[in-house]
Amino acid sequence: MFSIKEDRSKFPTKKADGTLDIDLDSQKYVKIWQGPNHPGITGNMALELTVSGDEVVQSKTHVGYLYRAFEKLMERRKFIQCFPICIRMCVPEPDINEYLLAASVEELGGIEVPEMAEWLRTLVLEMARVTILLRGVPGQGGTMSLGMGVQWGVYVRDLMLDRFEELTGGRVYHMYIAPGGVRGLLPSGFKDRMEEVLKKVDEFVVDIDNLMFNNAVFKVRTKGVGIIDKDWIDQYSVVGPNARAAGIMRDVRKDYPYLKYDQLDFEPHTETDSDIYARSRVRWHDLQTSVDLIRQIMAKMPEKGEIRAKTPNVLHWKIPKGETYQRIESSRGEYGFYMVTDGSAYPRRINLRGPSYNSAMVLLEKMLVNANISDVSSLMVSLATCPPEIER
Amino acid sequence: MKEILEKIKTKYEVTDVLQKRADLLFFTIDKKMVLDILNYLKELEGFTHLVMLSSVDWLEENKFQLTYIINHPINKHDIAIRVDLNRDEATMDSIHHIWIHAETDQREIKELFGIDFPGSPGVDEDFVLEDWDEIPPMRRDFDTLEYSERTFFPRDGRKTYDTKEYMKSKLYPDDKQ
């Protein structure tokens, strides 16, 4: 019978210490830098790829192009002054940082948040999730030159940003969540205008299903590509949609209910294939879950109520010595703040834990070995890499 | 959480126990026992998820604090293990063989705090800084203002005014008071 025996002679062998024996002078291998300025890279990050033909044999992630020392800056600022800094730690989804900083300060400072404020916070966080997923879901197609979905997503996202502007005054950075509560009530007629946007999102969900998930090229290039083994979930601390695509339920909203999520009825979607297609599909379902949650929140939340608890003067607010860890489900998975205070008006240490910290560094380096060069960017985007949270 | 704390107390000497929330427990343990307790909690008690490895500089007490936050994904609670290190000999055992991705945390802490983790893969490589020859920047005794004034000298042509006086002179030029 006819059989193909693959020629593996061009691939590097392992040296005694376990590293690969790659001699660039042998002309068998080429080094390619993908990034820091490259359309296939989210944000500023670089992948140093060693390729043999069109197959990656070694990959290394380089960060440091975006380091702005936010954690250091926050140690020299009062708690209220940390807000404008911390929101910039994740540019497309700033509200999670606002919430985590406020929740940590409230926990250590002993402040109870009014119920109405908790509802409004839940609403804003779900709106933020919709905003980022409107870019994230079609963005997967964008890495394979299916740019149309991205354009549609940007349009609907813009409508959602209008609602943000109406509610908070800002489009990208909102600064709506503050220690003790939120900054304002819903404007009159907000719910109707929000419902109009949600209808547009519903249409977008159907369109993107037809455009991307039923597309033969998309399927061929994503099914069975970039599989995260189930065993790796714990080994690499994979969280959120990436874990759910492997059939392992990880959702902070369900596991550690914060704000009003315990009063809302939802079930995060899981898949079992754990490839790029499954991860995109999980995000697509997440988008629908968030839309449904916004409708539930708007139906269940009270019309009026106190929105901000009384706090000490924020410029002279000394928080007792203590430490805590607060977590939240971002669109990419578990996102947390570890805050340490020392009794002064300044935080002693704020450390951020982002899901990309593990997935874009060690996990991506492992997954890219034996991948085709043309799959590199789609693999990276499927892990929902966000470089700003690696280098804070 | 109480049962697990009792179990730990029979095996290890823990101090400064703090039950922060029903699902979050803090305690301090001796530096030599860290690998042992992390292995025990991961393999036998099901704390399979390393949330983060963080460090805090307590300059006044001449010590670094390392915090290992580990999570039990099934019972849904966290333990934060604190370890105190002497600032003068800041070295800690690496845990990359327990959780592979801890090598990134350790690489970052080595660069930003100067705490060494011998044997951790790539721990001596640059993480976010390039050609840095000052003291590690996240240490409390690193003076950011002094560094930036020395490195990014004031540009010519820039003049600083007292805001109150300047506004007054612009808005009310005739007012001599």
Image (spheres, rainbow, N blue to C red):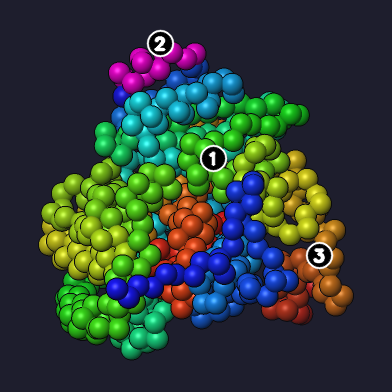
Residue at 69%, 78% in the rendered image: B171
Q: Is residue A236 visible?
A: yes
Quadrant for the N terminus of chain A, please: bottom left
Front of the two marks 2 and 3: 2
Q: Are marks 2 and 3 on the same chain?
A: yes
Residue behind mark 3: B152
- Which kind of residue does numbered mark 1 sit on? His
User: At 53% across and 25% down in the image, what residue appears?
Assistant: B34
Measuring 25% from the left and 83% from the top, which residue is drawn there?
Answer: A216
Three-letter amino acid code of the residue under disc 2: Thr
- Please tell me whether mark 2 sits on a helix, a strand or a loop: helix
Residue ID for mark 1 = B96
From the image, give the main secondary structure of the stretch colored magenta: helix
Mark 2 sits on what residue?
B10
**Residue at figure coordinates x 76%, y 29% from the top left:** B88
> x, y (%) of residue B47?
37, 33
Stretch in magenta:
B2-13
Question: Label 2 marks which chain's residue?
Answer: B
Could you tell me which secondary element the residue under label 1 belongs to?
loop
Q: Earlier in the sequence, mark 1 or mark 3?
A: 1
Which of label 1 and label 2 is nearer to you?
1
| Residue that extends furthest to the top in the rendered view of this protein | B10
Name the chain letter of the residue that bears numbered label 1.
Answer: B
Q: Chain of mark 3?
A: B
Alpha carbon separation for disc pair 1 and 3: 38 Å
Q: Are marks 1 and 2 in contact (CB under 8 Å)?
A: no
Q: Residue A273 placed where, x, y %?
A: 25, 61
Amino acid of disc 3: Phe
Could you say which is closer to the camera, residue A81 or residue A350? Answer: A350
